[in-house]
Amino acid sequence: MQLFAFGLNHQTAPLSIREQLAFNVDGMEGALRDLVKNGAAKEAAILSTCNRTELYCNAAHPEHAIDWLAHYHQLPRAEIEPYLYTLPREKAAKHSFRVASGLDSMVLGEPQILGQMKQAVRQAEQAGTLGFLLHKLFQTTFSVAKDVRTQTEIGANLVSMAAAAVRLAERIFPSIAEQRVLFIGAGEMIELNAVHFAARMPKHITVANRTLERAHALANRIKGHAITLNELPEHLAHHDIIVTCTASQLPILGKGMVERALKVRKHRPLFIVDLAVPRDVEPEVAELNDVFLYTVDDIAEVVKDGMGARQNAVKEAEVIIESGVCDFVHWMESREVVPTIRALRDHAERNRRHEMEKALRLLSKGETPEKVLEYLSNALTNKFLHAPTHALNQVHSEDRENFLEVIHRLYHLHTEE
């Protein structure tokens, strides 16, 4: 089993690189099948969020999987390699456990990543790329993450991305209750933000989404109004706060659209939080006067509040994770000897059947059962001891001591024996 994980995250790569390697939700299953079909991996799962793109593989040649990633996104490998981390075997397992537990997140201890990992596993299952090894890895990952969440205070005093967005907005506007808020998208991240902003009782809430049905579903929960993405140009100017997070591969809000909205607004401030990767808002929008644009990386400074209290739980969490890594590595190592054990048992079974057939022939010829049993037991003993005895006689002097130790351990021999 060649467990291997690699990828990049908010600690190793800027947003401009991360968005180029992000995977679209709708294309995830196709990407997984392509990865396995091309022989780059036997098993594969892809975790793609606003903060990270990671591939977990059972791959005989990990380099092929890295080549596949670069080729899939039509990028030179040399361009992305400086930002990649590569993690074999137990390092891959430990990383998976830390990610699911929230120890590797931009917001230390945030729980959303666990749901995102579970979604990645479901997508791999649906694509047919989740095999025996990765199934066990993620099964253990979720168990370890549960222990970390329940046995430590890693989630205490948590400032979420959504709460951070509200805090930033309150730095621009004296009261959100006097503002009109627009949410673009209807996924989990937008839902979290919508709940936090709705709690401030804004003057008006609008939800824009590609499908009107999903927009209505969220809008009804937060007492808002639903529109489609096609209606954005005519509604944009009527909102003071915009929070966007879609799966679009191209920007939703271009510089020109925002410029036109600012003219209608007579240059009243426009606060925009872009939590999408790839970005929903063209970077050039940040150059416009009266626009306060924050990306997912900009939120990092705000979410540091309460970090100190959670840092004390990190050491406890790491102990739980190390224990999980030891158990998982032991399982992997035990599975690696299974083919040898199977071959050994098959060899013994062939010898047993061969001698049993001889014994039955002797019985059919009239030999007494006692004599046949004596023959059978002697023949089996000689067969089973032939290979280790022959190897012991042939071993070179420099290897003899180690070989003798193995023989003593195998047969539980004492020195006097």
Image (tube, rainbow, N blue to C red):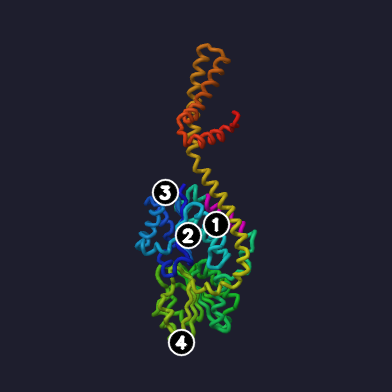
Q: Secondary structure at mark 1?
A: helix
Q: Which residue is mark 1?
A: 97
Q: Residues within 10 Å of mark 2 (few under 14, many from 20)?
A: many
- Give the Cα separation between the discs numbered 1 and 3: 22 Å
Residue 370 position, x and y percent, is: 58, 15
- What amino acid type should be assigned to the residue bearing mark 3? Ala
Q: Earlier in the sequence, mark 1 or mark 3?
A: 3
Left or right position of 370 against 17: right
The answer to whether residue 226 is visible is: no
Q: Secondary structure at mark 4?
A: loop
Residue 189 position, x and y percent, is: 52, 68
Q: Secondary structure at mark 2?
A: strand
Q: Which residue is mark 3?
A: 60
Q: Which residue is mark 2?
A: 47
Q: Quadrant of the C terminus?
A: top right
For the stretch drawn in magenta, what is the main secondary structure?
helix
Q: Earlier in the sequence, mark 2 or mark 3?
A: 2
Residue 267: assigned label? 4
- What amino acid type should be assigned to the residue bearing mark 4? His
The answer to whether residue 18 is visible is: yes
- Give the Cα separation between the discs numbered 3 and 4: 58 Å
User: Do callouts 4 and 1 mark residues in contact (Cβ within 8 Å)?
Assistant: no
In the image, which is nearer the foreground, mark 2 or mark 3? 3
Q: Residue at the far bottom: name it.
A: 266
In the image, which is nearer the foreground, mark 4 or mark 1? 1
- What amino acid type should be assigned to the residue bearing mark 1? Phe
